Image (tube, helix red, strand yellow):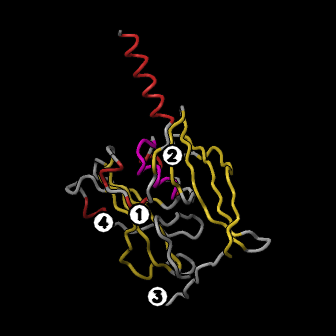
Amino acid sequence: MRNILLITLFLTASLWASSWQKLKPTLSYKTDDYQLTTIECLEFREYLVNENHTKIINKKPHITLSICPNKAALNLRKFHNTAPKLSSKRYMRQIGNYNDDSCQYEVNAFVLDSKGVVYRMDENKDPFSYLVPLDTPAKIALVLDLLDIKGGEKYRKKGKVLEVKTTQVESNPKDNYCVRKEYLYTLSLSGKLISKKLIKSKKLKEECIYPYIMPCDKY
């Protein structure tokens, strides 16, 4: 009887590990969905800067994502007032929706650890150490954003890696018609992209229309 129970539990665990789970857009998840236990706060802030990324035009940032499990953490005020790093050589992608204008933005991530120390980050890989292992849908969605992998719909854990299915609409350079493509990405649990495979492609009937980029009027 005990052997049957163990076999049943093993088969159930295997089935769960190989079943596809739904992914939502990053900004749809709430603080508790991330289950961050080693830090007090993680924020992504977007600053309007000049063309050379040497000067902040608007000192009040747009906070695109704030994950703060402990609202009464030590040095929280210092954390919110910490200035960003500015650099034209390093780059962090915007989280969630992209700006629809041609202005220049500097994106920084800020971390407040359990000892009250504040860290500033300006490269996509920098926040990974606080998000791994990728064991919640929220963490996976955020890492996909940082890796610039769009259209994430489903994921599953397969052995020691993650598989993610995405759907992306791209233009065909030959005739400018839209093509819907489905990709299968394989990632390590530490967020490293291992492979990308096209699994389905379908030409759509309409031409691709690109959004109009508004000229920058904020300087």
Magenta-colored span = 134-145
Mark 3 or mark 4, whichever is nearer to me? 3
Kind of residue sitting beneath label 4: His
Q: Which mark is residue 44?
A: 1
Mark 1 or mark 4, whichever is nearer to me? 1
Mark 4 or mark 2, whichever is nearer to me? 2
Q: Which residue is mark 3?
A: 218
Q: Which mark is residue 80?
A: 4
- Sooner in the amino-acid sequence: mark 1 or mark 2: 1
C-alpha distance separating marks 2 and 3: 39 Å
Residue 214, given in percent of the width and then of the height, sits at 54, 86
Could you say which is closer to the camera, residue 25 or residue 40? 25
Q: Is disc 4 surrounded by few (<14), some (14 to 19) or many (20+) residues within 10 Å?
A: few
Q: CB under 8 Å between callouts 3 and 4?
A: no
Kind of residue sitting beneath label 2: Tyr
Q: Is disc 1 surrounded by few (<14), some (14 to 19) or many (20+) residues within 10 Å?
A: many
Q: Which residue is mark 2?
A: 155
